[in-house]
Amino acid sequence: MVVLQNYILFCDASEVAFGACTYIRTINQDGKVHVALLASKARVAPIKRITIPRLEISAAVEAAKLDVVVRRDTIALAYIQNETRRSKTFVANRVTVIRQVSCWHHVGEENPADALSRGCYVDNLPVSWFNGSPFLSNYKCAWPAQDDLVGYLQDEGPEVRRDVYPTCIVQTCQSGVTQHPIDTLIEHYSRFYKLKKAVGWWLRLIQFLKKTKIPQSSPLEIHELKHAENLILKHVQGRAYFHETKNIEAGKTVLKSSSIYKLYPILIDGLLVVCGRLKHAVLNGQAINPVILPHNHRLSTLIVRDYHDSSHVGVEWTFSQVRKKFWIIRGRKLVKRVKMDCIVCKRLYGAPMNQRMSDLPPERCEPGGPAFRYVGVDLFGPFHVKVGRSEMKRYGCLYTCFTTRGIHIEKLDSLQTDAFINGFVRFTARRGYPNKVWSDNGTNLVGARAELARSVRDLDRSLIIRETRRRDVEWSFNPSSASHHGGVWERMIRSVRKVLSALIIKSPRMIDDVLQTLFCEAESIVNSRPLTKCSDDARVEKIICVSYVRQKVTVRSVVPFPPVTGIDFDECGGEKDRWVCSNRGIVSSMIFLALKLLERGL
């Protein structure tokens, strides 16, 4: 008959595995003890390497789920019995689960759970695996004695949380003399008014300690703040102008080597003030005799900062307000430094950062050569003209020469691709074929390239290549939404608009001929602008302008292409294809540009 029955668990861990095993221990009425294996559980150690104490704690968690644990590892048992030190999160969470078990013991080499953590074959299982450790067959009084392991933990243990204690730092001078309390307060506070309040409360405390009858809980009075201000000023002047003060008190003059010699300082109420010539002026006493302060002291910075932060305006206004009460040596320089360090002024008046411009492209740096060899093209408008009884929109197409900075303007009837192609033909007929053209990613400009490519797709490629190889024209588009890449021609459009705004006032109701005339006049005016500053020297013969430079450079002649046959002009009936049907010369003149684009795979 069983008199006593309980469950005992063993656990162990190693770098490869950890586990626990449960034994049932019974005592019959004759006093005999019987121990047998009841259950066991093992786990493989995590792939991420962790410390042995953490593995031991994990093994104890597995054992704690069963009931009573007999522990082997002293570090893990010390964590379980710890009541004085805080553990890290990993250990603390698991110790909470483990402490649900009422009794913990430490086992030496007689731990049957070693077979779970270290592994062994079935044939080599120890005898203690089936019947438990030998001491289990004895009464508990004969079990191994247990020591208190809490002291085994150290403050620098890997799983012990460090306690943070506040520290106090006492500031002293390098010479070993303690810093004056007023100097400490000046370094501590960032506002002059707060500094006066702090000193005022200290003065009230001193009066209270002297048993003086003063209101203890009421706010500081005006005279208390004034007394605190005078005390601060006297302290600063005593440190900065000690010898000057002693000389004036002794009835002597200030030495010429002093920085305040030219101010003719005098003492009023123990303060060094400026002795000016405004003694009989109807002004405030502080404005007649301002207090002298050094520029390199923190108190001067606090005073200037208080005046500056009241409005955040210019240097002269702040300096004039400071001069009404204080005379700071080199005060204007100090005011400038305070304004420069002010965060609010930087936000309100700070100049934005400017992007550094890149180098000019090689095409804009080549001297000499014909005009309009490298051009940029862009459209502007619209302009409203009268056509019969209706009002139509017209646009301008501006070509800018990169070499001479000259311009050429063509009038376009619409923003369609065909209108732009006709304008480009007129431009090349009068200025010659450019080597390279730049433009933005306008749909009409991109469409012009595609339209030309489709128009010559069915023509004789060998004939076109042979005749157009002499015209090497390249077209380059700026990135999308990057109008700043075309600043060369965008600036010229602004100049043209400025001229047209004055010319259109004379002709508010325009027709196509009037608009074409205005474009020509604007082109002439912009091209006659001087490239340099006009000289006052009478020996200078003429002013260098864009038109003069264009006359000096070589203008390439336009060699027309031979007539192209094989095009059915009767099929060109739509307005969009009107540029194809205009005349054979236009088609011949534009083939070279289309072929260049076809060679690029368009």
Image (spheres, rainbow, N blue to C red):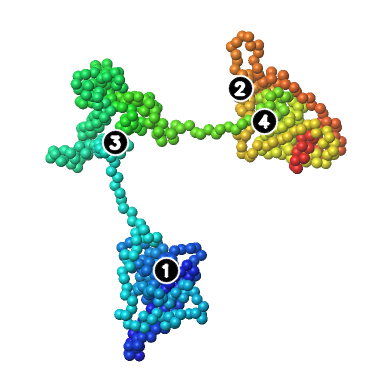
Mark 4–mark 1 distance (CA, rounded to whole Å): 74 Å
SS at mark 4 in the image: helix
Can residue 43 be seen in the rendering of this structure?
Answer: yes
Q: Nearer the viewer, mark 3 or mark 2?
A: 3
Circle 4: residue type = Pro
* N-term mark: 4 or 3: 3
Q: Verify CB contact (< 8 Å) between mark 2 and mark 4.
A: no
Circle 1: residue type = Glu
Mark 2–mark 1 distance (CA, rounded to whole Å): 93 Å
* N-term mark: 3 or 2: 3
Q: Verify CB contact (< 8 Å) between mark 4 and mark 3.
A: no
In which quarter of the view is residue 411 placed? top right
When the figure is inspected, residue 584 is found, relative to residue 602, above or below; the finding is above
* N-term mark: 2 or 4: 4
Dot 1 crowding, Cα within 10 Å, few <14, some 14–19, many 20+: many
Q: Nearer the viewer, mark 2 or mark 4?
A: 4
Q: Which residue, given by chain and number where applicable, does mark 4 sit on?
A: 362
In which quarter of the view is residue 293 placed? top left
Report the residue at 16% width, 40% height from top: 208
Q: Nearer the viewer, mark 2 or mark 1?
A: 1
When the figure is inspected, residue 84 is found, relative to residue 267, above or below; the finding is below
Dot 2 crowding, Cα within 10 Å, few <14, some 14–19, many 20+: few
Q: Which residue, given by chain and number where applicable, does mark 2 sit on?
A: 502
Mark 3–mark 1 distance (CA, rounded to whole Å): 58 Å
Q: Which residue, given by chain and number where applicable, does mark 1 sit on?
A: 56
SS at mark 3 in the image: helix
- Could you say which disc has been placed on residue 206 in the image? none
Residue 225 in the image, given as x and y percentages of width and height: 23, 34
Q: Which residue, given by chain and number where applicable, does mark 3 sit on?
A: 186
